[in-house]
Image (cartoon, helix red, strand yellow):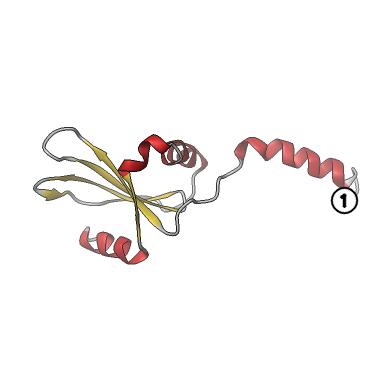
Amino acid sequence: MGEEPADLYNSRFEEAFARRRVVTWPFDGGILVREEGGTGGSGEAFLVDQWCLVSSFRYSDMGHGPFIRGGHTFDYDSYRVLAKYILDRRNRRSIRAISRREMEVLLADGAL
């Protein structure tokens, strides 16, 4: 609109959004994040892709419970939680990259 110089506007814009930058998804596809419950091989698993929760389910030695569908939409607050966990190298053992096909099979197995 010409109310201020473009470089000043662009500088203000960059400064305003600098804290809300999103890290590029660090995997080729989705991931499975396992959170172990500590007893009897039970826990909860989360299917995540492109910083979006796709689904979650509880598991044990007896099998897995019903899948709970995630919104599969980007949410900045969820991104911050996921990014903090996923980008922390100490959590790498609980994260496994999965192929698109494997995600489809897991979701189909969960009767979603």
Q: Give the residue at the far left of this rendering.
A: 62
Q: Where 51 sits versus 40, above or below?
A: below
Pick the quarter of the image with the C terminus: bottom left
The answer to whether residue 75 is visible is yes
The reply, left or right, for residue 103 in relation to residue 64 is right
How many marks the image carries: the answer is 1
Residue drawn at (43%, 36%) of the image: 88
Q: List the residue tagged with mark 1.
A: 1
The answer to whether residue 112 is visible is no
Give SS at disc 1. Answer: loop
Q: Quadrant of residue 13?
A: top right
Residue drawn at (36%, 52%) of the image: 31
Residue 61 percent coordinates (x, y)? 10, 46
Residue 94 percent coordinates (x, y)? 31, 42
Residue 79 percent coordinates (x, y)? 48, 42
Residue drawn at (36%, 42%) of the image: 92
Question: Depth check: 17 or 1 in front?
Answer: 17
Label 1 is placed on what type of residue? Met
Q: Quadrant of residue 78?
A: top left
Residue 73 percent coordinates (x, y)? 46, 52
Residue drawn at (32%, 60%) of the image: 103
| Callout 1 crowding tier (Cα within 10 Å): few <14, some 14–19, many ≥20 | few
The reply, left or right, for residue 8 in relation to residue 27 is right
The reply, left or right, for residue 100 in relation to residue 9 is left
Q: Where 104 sits versus 93, above or below?
A: below
Q: Where 49 sits versus 14, above or below?
A: below
Q: Give the residue at the far bottom of this rendering.
A: 101
Question: Depth check: 92 or 62 in front?
Answer: 92
Q: Give the residue at the far top of this rendering.
A: 38
